[in-house]
Amino acid sequence: MAFDGEAPEEPDRPDRPVPVGFDARRRALVDAAVALAAQLAGVQARQASVLSAVFELAEEMTAGSPTRVRDRDLAIRDLSAEVGAALRVSDRTVQARISDAWELVNRFPAAHAALAGGRISWAHVRTIMDAGCAISDDTARGQFEASSVTIAEHESAGRLRHRIVMDAEAARTDSIDERHRAARAARCVEVRDGADGMSDLYAHLPTVQAHGIADRLHRYARRIKNHPNPDTDGDAGGDVVWEERTLAQIQADVFADLLLTTDPTTAGDGLATIRAHVQVNIPATILTGTSTGTGAEGGGSPPTGGLPGVAELIGHGPIDTETARALAGNAPGWDRLFVNPTTGHVLEIDRYQPSADQRRILRVRDEHCRFPGCRYPATRSDADHTIDAAHGGPTAISNLGHFCRRHHTLKHHTRWKADNLPGGLIRWTSPLGVTYTDKPPRTVVFTTPDDTPPPF
């Protein structure tokens, strides 16, 4: 891509020879990149000032409240939702940015000033804050910040981290035991979805436990890799089957087997033990074996809301055909869904009594919390009346929606208002009177030609 702009003028420097030819263009591009980086840093500093002011507004809104801490948290959620909806960003993300901005402006003013002046980047700021946020003494933190900013003006963020980590450690007043107790309280497990039907499972654990788990996986993998088993399908002579998987693959498989079964050395597929509360859309063509899982069977265009022949783990994306068939084979039952052939909206489900059907239809329709930008799973959200039942709101699909506990609370305890519209739309109105319409995900499970009975 060509650069058509001009680099900003700089004062003459005797140590910089006047470039010619390609070097002149090279100098112009380098100077432009430096100037733009400084401008970007200044914009990020101004953005931090604005977001910090949002926090201060929440403080002012709840000043004098007898339950100030709870009311302030609710006010921050309220304002984060307003900003997030306007920016089309998750309000959880906005609230985290507000917290970071307040920390930067109020606890690291020197770093904020250096960012505003374009002398350091946001990556430098993040490194300084990560290392210094735990320094409780204001004077010690100020000294640490000043020295860190000086280093940051001449070093990359990666080198900066190495240079200042010991300074931050020396400035702390809490003991390693205290810090470990606090860090241990933050232990968790999370899933980060990737491509091609794969995801990463992260566990944040105490170091001893983490290394113990890794060592156990390694020992299991070594034992499986180095001890071939007789071929049970061969003749009595017992042909030897050598393990073809790599150690890394074996460790991943053992990890799954240990969590999903009781013994990773026994035969069987871990999928057979999955009984989690998940929603999987499996087109009939996959179950009948007429689909390759490419989503292109039949040569026609995919119907609204999905791809024919592609199974989907709701809220996470496509899964492979073999896994879909294994899950379907182990399922205690199936739901038959009737969908609008034009829009793909779920119209009816015929398995349970009406109240159960409503919950299942909602779960299929919504997939996740219906606040704009929120992806919290519907299976862990509240199926709530948009017009309260106490105020005459009917218990009907047209008056129900899934809201996570955060946004359920926001709807009931702030001036945010939700209204159901035809077609499964939910319109939110913010305290400023701005409206945001959330559309339900388009979901099609079974598609069959006219007059062809569904495979049940």
Image: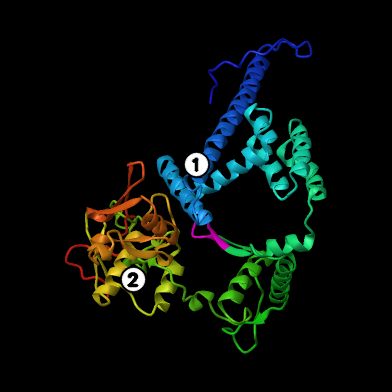
Q: Quadrant of the C terminus?
A: bottom left
Q: Quadrant of residue 234?
A: bottom right
Instruction: Look at mark 2 in the image and give the residue it sits on.
Output: 288
Give the class, few, some or many, for how many residues have Cα within 10 Å of label 2's Cα (few <14, many ≥20): few
Q: Quadrant of residue 305?
A: bottom left
Q: Is residue 16 above or below residue 326?
A: above
Is residue 346 among what the camera can see?
Answer: no
Helix, strand or loop at label 1? It is helix
Question: Where residue 57 is drawn, which disc sits there?
Answer: 1
Q: Residue at x 36, y 45 (%)?
A: 431
Residue 291 in the image: x percent, y percent? 36, 64
Left or right: 313, with 166 as reference point: left
In the rendered structure, does residue 194 fall within the stretch colored magenta?
A: yes
Q: The disc labelled 2 sits on which kind of residue?
A: Thr
State which tag comes first along the sequence, 1 or 2: 1
Residue 161 in the image: x percent, y percent? 75, 43
Helix, strand or loop at label 2? It is loop
Question: Where residue 211 is drawn, which disc sits there?
Answer: none
Q: Nearer the viewer, residue 453 or 48?
A: 48
The boundaries of the magenta stretch are 190-199
Left or right: 191, with 107 as reference point: left
Residue 54 in the image: x percent, y percent? 50, 41
Q: Nearer the viewer, residue 3 or 53?
A: 53
Is residue 208 among what the camera can see?
Answer: yes
In the rendered structure, does residue 422 fall within the stretch colored magenta?
A: no
Give the class, few, some or many, for how many residues have Cα within 10 Å of label 1's Cα (few <14, many ≥20): some
Q: The disc labelled 1 sits on which kind of residue?
A: Leu
